[in-house]
Image: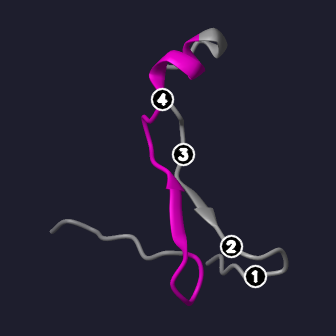
């Protein structure tokens, strides 16, 4: 059975950069693209961690 991940916050926020995005920018760091997912949210937004 496949596992699913939930987001570590409550609310609706803009997904500002996805995994693997902008490979030409990240190539200078030896990466094939952005190595995470970024979300634009106000400073102080509560994040959850198991």
Q: Secondary structure at mark 2?
A: loop
Q: Secondary structure at mark 3?
A: loop
Q: Which residue is mark 3?
A: 36
- Mark 1 or mark 2: which is in front? 2
Q: Residue at x 55, y 89 (%)?
A: 11
x and y percentages locating residue 47 in the rendered image: 70, 79
Residue 22 is tagged as 4
Separation of disc 1 and disc 2 at Cα? 7 Å
| C-beta proximity under 8 Å, tags 3 and 1 | no
Q: Residue furthest left?
A: 1
Residue 41 is tagged as 2
Q: Earlier in the sequence, mark 4 or mark 3?
A: 4
Reply yes or no: does residue 13 show up in magenta. yes
Separation of disc 1 and disc 4 at Cα? 26 Å
**Nearer-the-camera pick, 24 or 3:** 24
41 vs 26, left or right, is: right
Magenta range is: 8-27
Is residue 45 placed above or below 32 in the rendered structure? below
Residue 45 is tagged as 1
- Mark 2 or mark 3: which is in front? 2
Q: Earlier in the sequence, mark 1 or mark 4?
A: 4
**Nearer-the-camera pick, 12 or 30:** 12
Q: How is the image coloured?
A: one colour
Q: Earlier in the sequence, mark 2 or mark 3?
A: 3
| C-beta proximity under 8 Å, tags 1 and 2 | yes
Quadrant of the image for the N terminus? bottom left
Q: Residue at x 58, y 20 (%)?
A: 25
Q: Residue at x 50, y 16 (%)?
A: 24
């Amino acid at each position: 059975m496949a596992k699913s991940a939930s987001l570590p916050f409550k609310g609706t926020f803009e997904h500002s950069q996805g995994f693997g995005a902008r490979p030409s920018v990240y190539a200078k760091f030896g990466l094939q693209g952005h190595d995470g997912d970024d979300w634009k949210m106000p400073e102080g937004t509560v994040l959850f961690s198991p």
